[in-house]
Amino acid sequence: MKASSPYLQDFTRGIVKENPVFVALLGMCPTLGVTAFIVNGVGMGLAAAAVLIASNLVISLLRNYIPSQVRIPCFIVIIATFVTIIEMVLQAFQPVLYEALGVFVPLIVVNCIILGRAEAFASKRPVLRSLLDGIGMGIGFTLALLILSAVREILGHGTILGPDPESAIHLFGANFEPMALFAQPPGAFIALGLLLAIVNLLFKRFNIK
Amino acid sequence: MEKLLSIIFIYIFVENFVLQRFFGICPFLGVSRKMETAIGMSMAVVFVMTMATLVTWLLYTFVLVPFNLTYLQIVTFILVIASLVQLVEIVLRKISPTLYQGLGIFLPLITTNCAVMAVALLAVRQEFSFLESVVFAIAASIGFSLALIIMAGIRERLELAEMPDVLQGSAVTLITAGILSLAFLGFKGMLTL
């Protein structure tokens, strides 16, 4: 994968080559915690992506004004502000999702991906590049959660688009006995472990590094 | 008293913070390679988690709620935790250099340990009293330490095991954690609050 311009590289880096979940192993808590259903996983991914994009943008805009000794507290306050906004938005417009995600919504603030990108990228780069980096990383995170939650929901519940019975589509008919393990906490660890092994295998096969 | 005892049992075994609730996975994967570092990290977490919950609970109950500022909860809690970690680091360096040597490198890592933030948030969300919150924090951090130390023991042995190289590193660690979590699933439903 040879991207010519640095802008395109900034954008695509987070999606595959430096995927925050599968390659960098960051943001593991929400990755494992909310992926029993696709709806929750993608909702979490989008919420974190929104915070990441907004905080990358603001931190990059302020990068020349934040003194380097107190940069971490500054980043944390900026991130916490956006998390509060997202929490209020979810609570107002998506109450079901908000309930399902529970304490993981305020915990976006300690998601290492966001602070990591702020420290390693947005605090040193111009605005447009930081924005593209945020969007790419956000897509990468959401994609990873989508894959993991799809595996867990299809195997653990035999549905997609659950848990709401009205929208849930049963993939295997009424007699299907789901592997309840994948809906439970141990299944999250095992599914992610196996996915990581598959990603390692694919990276090796296609020489991505 | 009965409630305190059940909080202790529930948050060490039934709702183990790492293996059942998925809080603090990053340090769980990051510092479980050696037993020595795992023990150091555990001690630092027990200390900071208890302190953080104590301070955030008081702040929430006596400042945020009376002044109707609960929407500032996230900002306040994360700032309290971050500054507390700094404070603990400074105090430890002065009072007990030996302990500082042991815990020193782990303290900055704790700021982004979501288990600390989670325990502070959950104590408030579940409307625990002051004493219950402190006991909850101690139990949760012991649960965290238990998982971390068991994992370190397993990983020290796993180092020498032969396995396909795509599984090496984090993949096999996660699968091991899954099996460990399966064992803890056995406690499920034994006690509820």
Image (tube, rainbow, N blue to C red):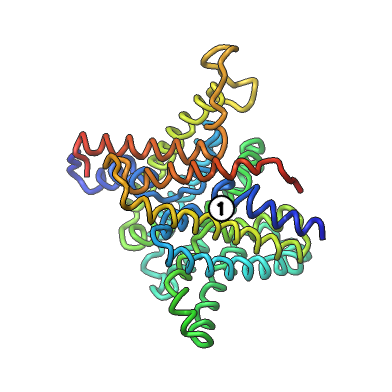
**Residue A85 image point, x, y percent:** 58, 51
Label 1, secondary structure: give it. Answer: helix
**Residue B43 image point, x, y percent:** 54, 69
Answer above or below: position of B32 versus A65.
above
User: Residue placed at 53% from the left, 23% from the top?
Assistant: A160
Answer above or below: position of B105 versus A21.
below
Answer above or below: position of B117 versus A164.
below
**Residue A99 image point, x, y percent:** 66, 40
Judging by the rendered image, the residue that carries numbered circle 1 is: A107
**Residue A154 image point, x, y percent:** 50, 24
Mark 1 closeness class: few <14, some 14–19, many ≥20 residues within 10 Å: many
Residue sitting farthest toward the bottom: B94
User: Residue placed at 74% from the left, 45% from the top?
Assistant: B192
Q: Nearer the viewer, residue B20 or B23?
A: B20
Report the quarter where the N terminus of chain A lies: top left
Q: Is residue A135 visible?
A: no
Answer above or below: position of B187 versus B152.
above
Identify residue type, mark 1.
Leu
Q: Tag 1, which chain?
A: A
User: Residue placed at 54% from the left, 21% from the top?
Assistant: A158
Judge from the rendering whether residue B147 lies leftward or rightward of residue A132; answer left or right: right
